[in-house]
Amino acid sequence: MGIKVLLAAILIWEITRGLGFNVYADNVVRIELKRQSLDLNNIRGARIYVKGLRGSNRNSVSSDEQIVYIKNYRDVQYFAEIGIGSPPQHFTVVFDTGSSNLWVPSSRCFFSIACYLRSTYKSRLSNTYTKNGNSCKIPFGTGSVHGFFSQDDTKIGSAVIKQQVFTEVTKEGYFTFLSARFDGVLGLGFQGADSKNVTPVWNNMVLQKIVSKSIFSFWLNRDPTSRMAGEILFGGMDWTHFRGLHTYVPVSKNGYWEIEIGDLFIGNNSTGFCKDGCSAIVDTGTAFIAGPTTILTQINHAIGAEGVVSSHCKTIVHDYGRTLWERLLSGLHPDNVCHGICSNNETLGVSHEPQMRMRNSKSQRLEKDILCNVCEMVAFWIQVEIRKERSKDLAFQYVNQLCEKLPNPGGRSYINCDVFSLPHITFTIGNKSFPLSPDQYVIRVDDHQGVHCLSGFTALNVHPQRPLWVLGDAFLRAYHTVFDFDNLQIGFAESA
């Protein structure tokens, strides 16, 4: 009798699960994501750009100043299909929380070869098309894509958004899009400067009452052999996709799904870099985790990733390391020990302290901004070693090793595929630890030459006083994510 009851309960659970009763909300829209494997050429070409900080004084940046966050989507791995028009014309798009526009190639894209290699929107074939015609350009990589606005019904999953404004792209960058494996981008970010006052798709889903709750959730399947690569749920969340409760943190910047994170740990060791808080953009449209070179170098060293040997870094350690050590021991803040190099003065330090002249030959060879950035990194690394009560010689030995592991700004770092001995990398979000195991932050790429393993971390430098992280798919595969539009917060729970 007991076995029959158990079997009946399992059967009822499976039926209700199939009918969607595992979903926390009514009026939800499910989007099943498809996965495409990464290849080394696209990974090498992937770039993230952050620009738009006002002012040129590196010491004048405030947390209120706005950034412009741009990427070229070369490393995207997850896609889904949407339809535009009546009857629907189908497009493969990236669902991207790092932008807010919907754009697809236009049939009027005559002079970009890339447009001939993918689906294009043909307004004459749609019964619900409404002409708009206003021109626009969308920041993309180091340039822009150009086109004009149109309006048409847009089908996403089972839902139809009426008269959605989108961009018909008529000019695409040749090299960027020639190898792209998608037609366009559907932005899930906030309506902002880059949206040209166009109401984004997600906002219209809420305004048109397609969903009853102003949330959407994002889940990536960690099983690479599964047919379903992931799922976006508009209007709710599926409790079978996560374990435990979500940890919610407020959105700190209107314009991006940007939050504040705390300290980062390599194994059990605190880096201390973000103990006072760092900004992080949660981005479904990039494969990697991007962060400040200062910390990425320490991660590279800990996981054995290939780096770039920096003569600039070794020069700072050799010529100025002992003075940096003494000044940090005296209580001088790391932001001030490199004042001379970072200002127009030719001294390292401040005016009331013993001065150390930069050699004219070196100041001519080494560009001042590079020296300044490197000096600030070295000062931070030395301070970490002082806190660990390391001897001066051991500290300098470690810092010199870090100088050989600087992330390559133009590429990705290869590591040994034997990952079992590597440390966990742990982010602190909402005063809770979110660890990534080696198999979660190591990205495996198969090609005709075999299996290649890359670090899931890549360098992103904005400003030393405004360190920024980007939590891409390498993080989101480990943690189910809820984007709460009404309460302006993001929630993370262990992915199932």
Image (cartoon, rainbow, N blue to C red):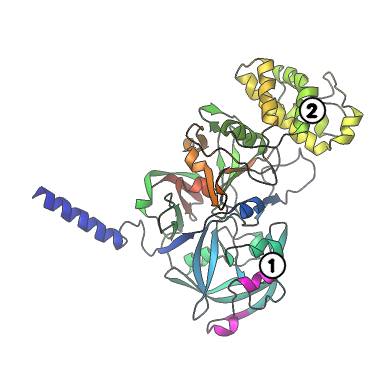
Identified at 44% across, 63% down, the residue is 31
Q: Vertical placement of 155 versus 32: above or below?
A: below
Q: Vertical placement of 217 versus 182: above or below?
A: above
Relative to the observer, which residue lies in front, 368 or 261? 368
Q: Vertical placement of 362 versus 97: above or below?
A: above
Q: Are marks 1 and 2 in contact (CB under 8 Å)?
A: no
* Mark sitting on residue 20: none
Question: How many numbered dots are placed on residues in this image?
Answer: 2
Is residue 368 visible from the viewing direction of this image? yes
* Quarter holding residue 346: top right
* Three-letter amino acid code at the position of disc 2: Thr
The residue positioned farthest toward the front in the image shown: 449
Compared across the picture, whether 202 is left or right of 386 comes to: left
* Quarter holding residue 118: bottom right
Q: Vertical placement of 450 versus 189: above or below?
A: above
Residue 24 pos. (x, y %): 35, 56
* Mark sitting on residue 315: 2
Q: Secondary structure at mark 2?
A: helix
Q: Secondary structure at mark 1?
A: loop
Mark sitting earlier along the chain (1/2)? 1
Identified at 29% across, 63% down, the residue is 19
Q: Which residue is tagged 1?
A: 172
Identified at 47% across, 36% down, the residue is 432
The residue positioned farthest toward the top in the image shown: 391
* Three-letter amino acid code at the position of disc 1: Glu
Residue 320 pos. (x, y %): 79, 23
Neighbours of disc 2 within 10 Å: few (<14), some (14-19), many (20+)? some
Is 127 part of what is drawn in magenta? yes
Q: Which residues are magenta?
A: 113-131
Is residue 168 visible from the viewing direction of this image? no
